[in-house]
Image (spheres, rainbow, N blue to C red):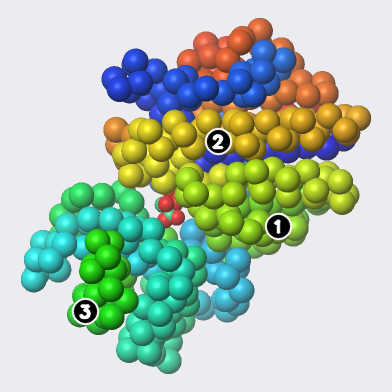
Amino acid sequence: MKYIIVVGDGMADYPRPELENKTPLQYANTPNMDLLASRGEVGLVKTVPEGFAPGSDVANLSVMGYAPEKYYTGRSPLEAVSMGVDLTDVDVAFRCNLVTLSGEPDYARKQMVDYSAGEISSEEARELINVIESQLGTGDKHFYPGISYRHLMVWRGGPEKTALTPPHDISGQIVGEYLPRGDGSSELLEIMQQSYAILRNHPVNVTRVEKGLRPANSVWLWGQGKRPALPLFKDLYRLEGAVISAVDLIMGIGICAGMQVIKVPGATGNIHTNFKGKAQAALQALQDGADYVYLHVEAPDEAGHQGDTDIKVRAIEEIDRNVLGLIMDGLAEFADYKVMVLPDHPTPLSTRTHTAEPVPFVVSGKGSAHSSVQAYNEETATASGLMIPDGPSLMRRFING
Ligand SMILES: O=C(O)[C@@H](CO)OP(=O)(O)O
């Protein structure tokens, strides 16, 4: 038996006036998701436990079968694992975004213009993070370049409980109310402020501005935590699994879970990603002996954060045609299989950030129940009346029947 889960990060949403009052999932042309729904079971699953912020870290842990209440230690340490940075017991890892802030002289009065610094390239970002390391790195604090705008700071003996805000939660807002608070906050703020002075006129940014691109003029620290420890996926669920994603968060969870991490050329974490390549890599992994693949696509989430309806609809259609379509064709060569499609959390276009509402899922394949619906979306999933209380319960139901 082979299992594939396709996650469209942040795919769930609310009805939109510009989409004939439909959600992007309802509006998009998704014949493959709808075919799965007509043959299988749809329902809702709660991926964000009470009391947790609806981050992709929490929600993906849950969907991957790991109760956040038990295993969550923060987002950045999971990314550190994927980046190959070993954390000791006393290290605290912080997500270090490269962001675009507006030009007001007082840091607190600046606006969060872009949490992604115009989706800066990894090459440009590496140069900037290396400068930050050379000027702000110390014996106990180090900066490591990652992918695009997503980087890492490790602080030996650093604070874990500081109140820090994800920059994608405050797009367009004045940052003053969202600066670090509590334990260690003055040092963290100092780093952010100093980074602005260092990065503002860096040649990489001068060139970006000349090209009409957004400068990566500050680092923004958030998502901190200590080294995670997850039981192996095969010990929990008796399957050899593989993970496919463009982002370090998901690859980090995969590594911690002892799953194979497959890197796909051209996987970018946005709408320009290699959708077909991900599907082909998933099928290849199953042919090569994996029992289970977790295939994650970041593009709809990015479109949600950017408030871009057209790109969100396009991302969903790409997932349907170029990921799911290929997977459904390829799975036909296996005797028995099961497919699930779902988002980790909603990233509504109206809020431009995540919400904690339950998300729609569809499961089809050997042994799946039948919901007798013709489409996969928020409305059909709600109407089904099926509510799974958490990700691990859904994983057990998916695997065991
Ligand atoms: O990686 C990130 O910084 C965020 C925003 O893109 O991702 P997500 O919304 O999936 O948490």
| Circle number at residue 262 | 1
Q: Quadrant of residue 353?
A: top left
Q: Residues within 10 Å of mark 3 (few under 14, many from 20)?
A: few
Q: Earlier in the sequence, mark 3 or mark 1?
A: 3
Instruction: Determine the residue located farthest toward the top in the rendered image.
Output: 372
Q: Earlier in the sequence, mark 2 or mark 3?
A: 3
Q: From mark 2 to mark 3, how far is it between C-alphas?
A: 38 Å
Instruction: Please name the residue shown 39% across and 68% down the image.
Output: 96
Mark 1 Cβ and ligand 1 under 8 Å apart? no
Instruction: Determine the residue located farthest toward the bottom in the rendered image.
Output: 139
Q: Nearer the viewer, residue 69 or 250?
A: 250
Q: Quadrant of residue 121?
A: bottom left
Secondary structure beneath dot 2 equals helix
Q: Residues within 10 Å of mark 1 (few under 14, many from 20)?
A: some
Amino acid identity at mark 3: Asn
**Residue 68: x %, y % from top left:** 56, 48
Q: Quadrant of the C terminus?
A: top right
Amino acid identity at mark 1: Ile
In this rendering, the answer to whether 41 lies above or below 144 is above
Q: Nearer the viewer, residue 394 or 98?
A: 98
Q: From mark 3 to mark 1, how far is it between C-alphas?
A: 38 Å
**Residue 93: x %, y % from top left:** 47, 71
Q: Which residue is mark 2?
A: 318
Instruction: Determine the residue located farthest toward the front in the rendered image.
Output: 211
The answer, for residue 374, to whether it is visible in the render is yes
